[in-house]
Structure formats: structure tokens, C-alpha cells
């Protein structure tokens, strides 16, 4: 990085240069629409990098650039924006600093890592939400519903689905429910166990007799602790016992 002869520029000027360079290089409409939001978020990044690129202490600048790239990903920016951010930062700093090739490569790696990490987290979250929303509930007989839960879930993912199933029990006039936990990933965390217990409690309030299949001993203990088993809830080892 080489200092130029021009005087330092203001934060507003750096932000304007960043926005102009970003807009010029963004290739998709949805990316162009993010110019204003990203320019505002880029201002502290530019402030820190303007100092750290000269001093060589880049940790804080890298951390802020990572957050900026993650923010771009969370807003739905396309992958190429990770590279565009670095180019826009270089253009914004050019009046006072020239970023050399090695520094640009390092900034590019940081931006890509931040963007990819955020997209991975977003994709994982969407997959978990989709899996939780599409759990299976079927009518086994008149007034009898079977709920078959499968996969690895947190309470925050599966909780809303269990609440929806509880409402469906009411609307359908259900009298008995088989809650199959055999395909849930074990061990079942306490928060998810609490959500399952809450579901059985809601069912009991509606007068629905619940048969819980495949509940581990710890879950049975928790149901007892929360007095769920005081209602019409029966732990069974296999479907034969639920007849």
C-alpha cells in the first residue's frame, strides 16, 4: 500500500465513492438495489481499513469486512458481490491509499469466507425450517391421528409445527393421537423435550389421549416432572400396545 499526495477524504466522501464503485460493478438488479444499505454498513469498515492498512494491524479491519460480507449475504446478494465489495473498498480508499495486490488478495479471501459462512448458515436454517414444517401427520382411523416425527430438530424449528398439529387436533375433533418419536435423532434435547411435553399437555387439555412411541427414558422422566403424564398420555414401546 502506497500513500498518495492527496489529502485525506471525509467519511461521507469515502461512502459515496464506495457506493459509486459498487453500483458500477454490480451485475444484477437485486445487487444494485443493495448499494445504499451496504454503503452505510461499509463506512466503519472504510474508517478502520484506512488506518489499519497503513499500520499493518489488520485484525479489526478483517473482522469488520467479514461482518459486511455476511450482511450482504443475509440481504440476498449474489456470490459475486463478495468480490465487488473488495473492489468498492479499494476505490473508496484510493484518494489516500493504494491497496497492493497482496493486500487485495487477503481482503478478497476474508470477504469470500464471510459471505460463504453466512450463506451456509442461511441455507442450513432454511433446510431445517423446511424439514420441520413438513413433518407427517395422517388420520389412522376416525378420530385417531398419527404424527410421525423424523430427523434432527431444535425446539425453535419443531415447536411451531407441534403447535400447528395441536390446533389440528382441535379442528378435527380428534380423540386419540399416536406420537411416534422413533425416527427423531437421539438424544432429544431438553428444549425439544419440553416442546413435546407441551404438545401432549395441549392434547390432554383437548381431551385427546396421546400414545407416545419411542420416547427415551429421560423424556419419560421429564414428562413426569412436568406432570404431563397426569393427563391421558401413555408411553408405549411399540404400536401394538397402542391399540
Image: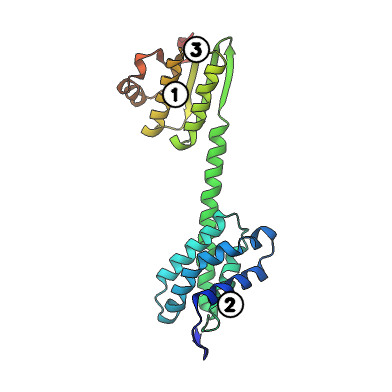
Splitting the image into 4 quarters, where does residue 76 fall?
Answer: bottom right
Q: Circle 3 is placed at which residue position? A: 176
Query: Do labels 3 and 1 touch, CB within 8 Å?
Result: no
Q: Earlier in the sequence, mark 3 or mark 2?
A: 2
> Is residue 233 placed above or below 63 in the rendered structure?
above
Local packing at callout 2 (Cα closer than 10 Å; few below 14, some 14-19, many 20+) is: many
Residue at the image point whose x is 36% and y is 32% from the top: 190
Q: Residue 189, can we see it?
A: no
The colouring scheme, among rainbow, by chain, secondary structure or one colour, is rainbow
SS assignment at label 2: helix
Counting from the top left corner in percent of width and height, residue 216 is at 38, 25
Identify the residue at the far bottom of this view. Answer: 5
Residue at the image point whose x is 48% and y is 63% from the top: 66
Counting from the top left corner in percent of width and height, residue 130 is at 57, 37
Q: Which mark is residue 91?
A: 2
Residue at the image point whose x is 51% and y is 67% from the top: 42
Q: Earlier in the sequence, mark 2 or mark 1?
A: 2
Q: Circle 1 is placed at which residue position? A: 199
Amino acid at each position: 500500500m502506497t500513500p498518495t499526495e492527496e489529502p485525506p477524504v471525509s467519511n461521507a466522501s469515502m461512502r459515496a465513492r464506495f457506493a459509486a464503485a459498487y453500483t458500477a460493478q454490480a451485475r444484477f438488479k437485486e445487487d444494485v438495489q443493495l448499494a445504499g444499505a451496504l454503503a452505510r454498513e461499509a463506512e466503519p469498515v472504510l474508517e478502520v481499513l484506512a488506518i489499519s492498512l497503513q499500520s499493518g494491524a489488520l485484525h479489526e479491519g478483517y473482522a469488520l469486512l467479514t461482518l459486511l460480507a455476511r450482511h450482504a449475504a443475509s440481504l440476498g446478494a449474489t456470490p459475486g458481490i463478495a468480490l465487488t465489495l473488495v473492489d468498492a473498498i479499494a476505490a473508496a480508499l484510493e484518494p489516500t491509499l493504494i491497496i497492493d495486490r497482496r493486500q487485495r488478495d487477503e481482503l478478497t479471501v476474508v470477504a469470500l469466507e464471510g459471505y460463504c459462512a453466512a450463506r451456509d448458515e442461511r441455507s442450513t436454517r432454511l433446510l431445517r425450517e423446511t424439514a420441520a414444517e413438513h413433518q407427517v401427520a395422517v388420520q389412522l382411523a376416525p378420530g385417531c391421528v398419527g404424527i410421525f416425527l423424523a430427523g434432527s430438530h431444535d425446539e425453535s424449528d419443531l415447536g411451531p409445527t407441534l403447535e400447528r398439529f395441536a390446533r389440528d387436533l382441535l379442528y378435527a375433533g380428534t380423540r386419540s393421537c399416536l406420537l411416534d418419536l422413533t425416527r427423531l435423532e437421539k438424544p432429544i434435547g431438553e428444549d425439544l423435550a419440553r416442546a413435546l411435553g407441551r404438545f401432549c399437555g395441549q392434547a390432554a387439555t383437548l381431551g385427546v389421549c396421546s400414545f407416545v412411541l419411542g420416547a427415551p427414558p429421560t423424556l419419560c422422566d421429564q414428562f413426569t416432572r412436568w406432570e404431563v403424564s397426569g393427563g391421558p398420555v401413555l408411553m408405549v414401546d411399540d404400536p401394538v400396545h397402542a391399540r
